[in-house]
Image (spheres, rainbow, N blue to C red):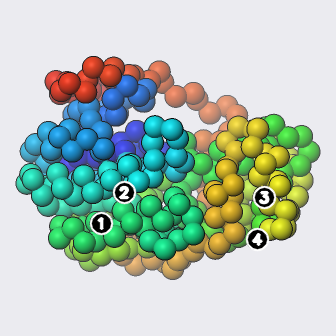
Amino acid sequence: MILVTGATGCVGRVVVERLTACGHAVKCLWHWNHEHLAPRKVTIIGGDTRNLASLVEAMEDVDTVVHLASIRRETHTDSFEEVNIGGTRNVVEAMKQTRATRLITVSCLGAETRSAYPFLRSIGKAEEIARASGLNFTVLKSAVVYGPGDWLTAWITGVASALPFVLPLPHAGATRLQPIWVGDLAACVERCLSTRATYRQVVPVGGPQALTLADIAESTLSARGVRRRLVRVPSSLTRQMTRFLARYRGALNEQEMESLSHNRTTETGGVHRVFGFAPARMQAKLDYLRPDSLPPPLPVRFPAWWQAGPPRIRARS
């Protein structure tokens, strides 16, 4: 049995679909009082990575944990220290109290314990906790992920829908990223289960192309069916641009925009070398941005009283 935390996020949803399609028994940690799309053919149990007791209960009959729960932005109720760092620490502790011994987690390129950016620093510390756990771990150090519900294409399309004629790009649009399709990242997660070369390793993964932010914006706008003139804002004016764009849907905050000043790339053939398949090019996987793409089904909600210890339920296929 595989427990997936963060099963309702952009990456988590696709990982759950991939695992079930490959015949694995999957249990999803479902955050209390949050609305999410219901996954199919899985066991659902309410819980929270910040609650050690709920994790210990969720890990009954579990031998492998795919830990994906994290936040990109702090709020008055969620902090990087509690969710990204403390949540990972709780997952490791719960695994030590149960029979789970295999830990697979997703980090990101640029995540370091001494990073100047709080989000990347917190993910770097979480990665360090996994590496020091003594468990059979794999850390997939991923390039920026794109797919339904991602932050990158959501930001580009959100600003483009609000601003006519132009799309401003921070740091002159020159930052080099290596976007990986969420389905390919999910395939990497699933193949970690049987790829011994990933055991007790940090494995960088990325797409097949190193693209500039301007390249990514052009592909995203084309898939969306809109035309905008790209305005390459120099780094010296990026902070002012961030404040101007803060009012629009999908806006990035100042720290997120500043972190885009650094290239985040890795070996372009790394996925093929380690996992035996070639990841897709970005231009071929942007159909979800088309205006006529189907809306998602209605979400489901677990009420707050599930914190008292809800019964397990199995979603209907």
CA gap, disc 4 and disc 1: 33 Å
Task: List the residue tagged with mark 1.
Answer: 129
Towards the viewer: 304 or 168: 304
In-front residue for pair 186/142: 142
Circle 2: element type: helix
- Mark closest to the chain's N terminus, 3 or 2: 2
Provide the residue designation for mark 4: 174
Q: Where residue 310 sits: x, y (%)?
A: 19, 24
What is the C-alpha distance between the residues marked 3 and 2? 28 Å
Q: Earlier in the sequence, mark 2 or mark 1?
A: 2
Residue 172 against residue 10 in the figure, above or below: below
Q: How many marks?
A: 4
Q: Are marks 3 and 2 in contact (CB under 8 Å)?
A: no
Q: Does residue 159 appear in this view? A: yes
Give residue 162's position: percent from left, percent from top. Answer: 81, 37
Q: Is residue 165 above or below residue 101?
A: above
Residue occupying the point 51% across, 58% down: 119
